[in-house]
């Protein structure tokens, strides 16, 4: 019962994080970039820490370091790679027929980007909801660690998504609403995760390494490369400290277990 309460509370909080996108309206571009990169560093640290210190150890404790764990972790990497590839294709590799159409109707092309972004983000949030549910079914501390890692990743992601929706031609109010609805898909993922978890004993054995693979892919392929684009020494030091702080936060949460 406690796991159910904490799971639903966590995914509601994760969904509400979508409203952070509105903050971008009140910050100068340069200041927003600085804040975003620091958040990206912190997020990368929590994702690495969550995967290596919480999700994988719990999976290995249940199953041992088996081929199943390794393959499920790789499945998480592959699924998130495929998801990102689909979004990237629709953003930058628009089919020729749409490209020709966009010359006559540029608004239609932008709207297409917004729809694809919402769909991809919704699927991503659904998987986050599954991961949070599976983590709480193992233990409350693992669930808390997973939730924090998801939230810290979602903050810079939601800022970026809000900007994409504005670019796609949506009004500020509509962009906030659609971004929230996309984020709220995490609640659906959590509910399905709870149902599966209560009926399928092996659910947590699959979802934990899968989530770990997703965390490692996001941190290693999405976040870290962004940090390497920063050449300023002072900013780089700040990012390094934020990365360590994210890992340190996950280490601190081990004390709850």
Image (cartoon, helix red, strand yellow):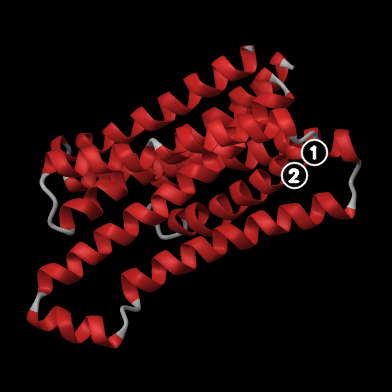
Instruction: Indicate the secondary structure of the residue bearing disc 1.
Output: loop
- Find residue 108 and report its image quarter: bottom left
The number of numbered badges drawn on the structure is 2
Residue designated by label 1: 202
- Left or right of 14? Residue 113 is left
Q: Is residue 63 left or right of residue 250?
A: right
| C-alpha gap between disc 2 and disc 1 | 7 Å
Q: Residue at x 41, y 48 (%)?
A: 122
For the residue pair 178 and 200, the one nearer the viewer reads as 200
Q: What SS does tag 2 mark?
A: helix
Above-or-below relation of 206 to 3: below
Which residue is drawn at the image coordinates 91% and 41% (left, top)?
Answer: 64
Q: Position of residue 19 (x, y in %)?
A: 27, 32
Position of the N terminus, as image quadrant, is: top right
Residue drawn at x 24%, y 55% is 164
Q: As drawn, which residue projects farthest toward the front?
A: 199
Q: Residue at x 19, y 71 (%)?
A: 109
Front one among 219 and 123 = 123
Q: What residue occupies the far top of the structure in this picture?
A: 2
Residues at discs 2 and 1 in contact (Cβ within 8 Å): yes
| Res. 238 visible in picture | no
Residue beneath disc 2: 206
Q: Nearer the viewer, mark 2 or mark 1?
A: 1
Q: Is residue 159 visible?
A: yes
Give the quadrant of the C terminus: top right
Q: Quadrant of residue 46?
A: top right
Q: Percent x, y for residue 65?
A: 89, 46
Residue 118's place in the image compared with 174, above or below, is below
- Position of 88 compared to 212: left or right? left
Instruction: Count residues near mark 1 (Cα–Cα under 10 Å), then give few for <14, some for 14-19, many for 20+.
Output: few
């Amino acid at each position: 019962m406690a796991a159910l309460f904490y799971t639903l509370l966590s995914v509601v909080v994760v969904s509400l994080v979508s409203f952070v996108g509105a903050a971008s309206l009140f910050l100068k571009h340069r200041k927003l970039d600085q804040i975003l990169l620091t958040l990206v560093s912190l997020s990368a640290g929590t994702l690495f820490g969550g995967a290596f210190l919480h999700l994988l150890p719990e999976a290995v404790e249940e199953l041992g370091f088996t081929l199943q764990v390794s393959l499920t972790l790789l499945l998480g990497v592959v699924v998130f790679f495929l998801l990102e590839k689909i979004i990237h294709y629709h953003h930058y590799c628009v089919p020729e027929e749409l490209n020709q159409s966009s010359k006559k109707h540029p608004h239609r092309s932008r709207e297409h980007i917004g729809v694809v972004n919402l769909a991809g983000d919704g699927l991503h949030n659904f998987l986050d909801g599954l991961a949070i549910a599976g983590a709480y079914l193992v233990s409350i501390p693992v669930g808390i660690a997973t939730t924090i890692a998801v939230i810290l990743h979602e903050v810079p992601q939601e800022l970026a998504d809000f900007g994409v929706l504005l670019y796609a031609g949506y009004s500020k109010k509509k962009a906030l609403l659609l971004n929230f609805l996309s984020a709220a898909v995490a609640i659906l993922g959590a509910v399905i995760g709870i149902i599966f978890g209560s009926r399928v004993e092996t659910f947590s054995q699959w979802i934990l390494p899968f989530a770990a693979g997703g965390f490692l892919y996001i941190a290693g392929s999405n976040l870290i490369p962004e940090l390497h684009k920063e050449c300023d020494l002072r900013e780089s030091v700040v990012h390094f400290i934020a990365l360590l702080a994210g890992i340190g936060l996950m280490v601190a949460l081990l004390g709850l277990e």
